[in-house]
C-alpha cells in the first residue's frame, strides 16, 4: 500500500471522509469474496438480512474474523491496520469489528442515512474503512455529507435490519434530518474493487441508493480505534452486539482486550 499523502489525511480531517483508490490487491480481494461465501453458507450469531423478503437480498454479518481464517489473516496482515493507524495518527490500532455486506444483482435496499458513532460503545478516536470488493457506480457505493462530523451533533441510530432489532433505543438523540437527502450537499464516488473510503464516526453517510443490476456487489467495513480508546456503556442505544459479546469491558476500561485486539502494523516498533 502507498501511504496516503498529506492531502488525503487533510481531506479526511476536513470532510470526515476520503476516497483512497487501489488500496487492496486482487489476490486479497479474491480471498475476501471467498470468505463472504463461506460466511453466507454458515451464518454467525450476528448475521442479518437487511432487505425485505420480497426484494433481492442484501445481507451482512459481523465478527467473522473470530472463526474464518481468511478474514483473520487479512485483518492482521493486510494494509488496513496501517491505513487506519496513519489516519488516526497512531502507531497501532484496536480492531473493533469486521462487517461484510453482500447485495445480490438488482438489490435496491439502501442503508439509511446515519452516523457510525452512536452505535458504538467507544470513548475516543475511531474510524471506519469501507472496502469495495467489486466495481460499483457512485449511487450504489457510499454517499456522505462532507463536514457533517464537525456539526457538533449526534443523531439517533437507525434500524438496518428488515426484521428484528439491532438496537433498543434512541438515547434521546435527535433524528437524522431530512435535509441530508439533498444531493447538492452530498458527495459520492464511483469505486473500483480495492478502493477504500475512510469515514469519521460522526460523518453522515448512506449506501445503495441505486442497484448494481448484473452482478453481486460486496464490500467489507472494518472499524479501528486509537490505542487509548476506552469503553463507555451507551445502553440500549448501542448496537446489540455489545451486549452479546463476552468482552468484559465496563465504562472507563481501555477498549483493548481479546475481543478487541491491539494490532501493530508491519514496520512499526514492536512488530
Image: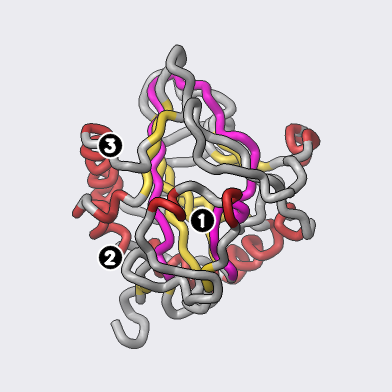
Please name whichever residue, 187 or 170, is drawn nearer the observer in this view of the structure.
170
Report which quarter residue 159 is drawn in. Answer: top right
Query: Dot 2 corresponds to which residue?
Result: 77
Give the Cα separation between the discs numbered 3 and 2: 24 Å
Q: Are marks 1 and 3 in contact (CB under 8 Å)?
A: no
Q: Position of residue 190 (x, y in %)?
A: 54, 38
Give the CA distance from mark 1 to mark 2.
18 Å
| Residue contact at pointers 1 and 2, CB within 8 angstroms | no
Residue 108 colored in magenta in the image: yes
Tag 3 residue: 43
- Secondary element under disc 1, as helix, strand or loop, is strand
| Foreground tag (3 vs 2) | 3
Q: In the picture shown, does residue 58 fall above or below 106?
A: below
Of mark 1 and mark 2, the one earlier in the sequence is 2
Compared with 212, 92 (above or below) is below
Q: Quadrant of the C terminus?
A: bottom left
| Visible residue check, residue 46 | yes
Q: For mark 1, what is the residue?
A: 128
Q: Secondary structure beneath disc 3?
A: loop
- The local crowd at label 2, few if under 14, some if 14 to 19, many if 20 or more residues have their Cα within 10 Å, is some
Amino acid at each position: 500500500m502507498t501511504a496516503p499523502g498529506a492531502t488525503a489525511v487533510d481531506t479526511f480531517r476536513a470532510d470526515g471522509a476520503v476516497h483512497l483508490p487501489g488500496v487492496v490487491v486482487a489476490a486479497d480481494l479474491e480471498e475476501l469474496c471467498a470468505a463472504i461465501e463461506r460466511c453466507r453458507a454458515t451464518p454467525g450469531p450476528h448475521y442479518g438480512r437487511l432487505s425485505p423478503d420480497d426484494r433481492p437480498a442484501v445481507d451482512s454479518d459481523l465478527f467473522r474474523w473470530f472463526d474464518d481464517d481468511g478474514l483473520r489473516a487479512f485483518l492482521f496482515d493486510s494494509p488496513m491496520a496501517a491505513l487506519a493507524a496513519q489516519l488516526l495518527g497512531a502507531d497501532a490500532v484496536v480492531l473493533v469489528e469486521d462487517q461484510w455486506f453482500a447485495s445480490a444483482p438488482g438489490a435496491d435496499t439502501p442503508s439509511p442515512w446515519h452516523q457510525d458513532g452512536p452505535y458504538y460503545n467507544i470513548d475516543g478516536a475511531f474510524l471506519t474503512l469501507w472496502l469495495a470488493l467489486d466495481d460499483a457506480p457512485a449511487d450504489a457505493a457510499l454517499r456522505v455529507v462532507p463536514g457533517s462530523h464537525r456539526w457538533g451533533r449526534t443523531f439517533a441510530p437507525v434500524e438496518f435490519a428488515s426484521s428484528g432489532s439491532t438496537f433498543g433505543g434512541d438515547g434521546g438523540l435527535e433524528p437524522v434530518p431530512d435535509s441530508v437527502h439533498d444531493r447538492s450537499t452530498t458527495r459520492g464516488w464511483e469505486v473500483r474493487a480495492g478502493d477504500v473510503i475512510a469515514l469519521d464516526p460522526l460523518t453522515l453517510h448512506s449506501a445503495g441508493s441505486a442497484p448494481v443490476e448484473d452482478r453481486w456487489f460486496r464490500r467489507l467495513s472494518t472499524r479501528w480505534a486509537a490505542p487509548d480508546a476506552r469503553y463507555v456503556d451507551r445502553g440500549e442505544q448501542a448496537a446489540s452486539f455489545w451486549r452479546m459479546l463476552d468482552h468484559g469491558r465496563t465504562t472507563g476500561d481501555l477498549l483493548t482486550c481479546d475481543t478487541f485486539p491491539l494490532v501493530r502494523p508491519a514496520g512499526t516498533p514492536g512488530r
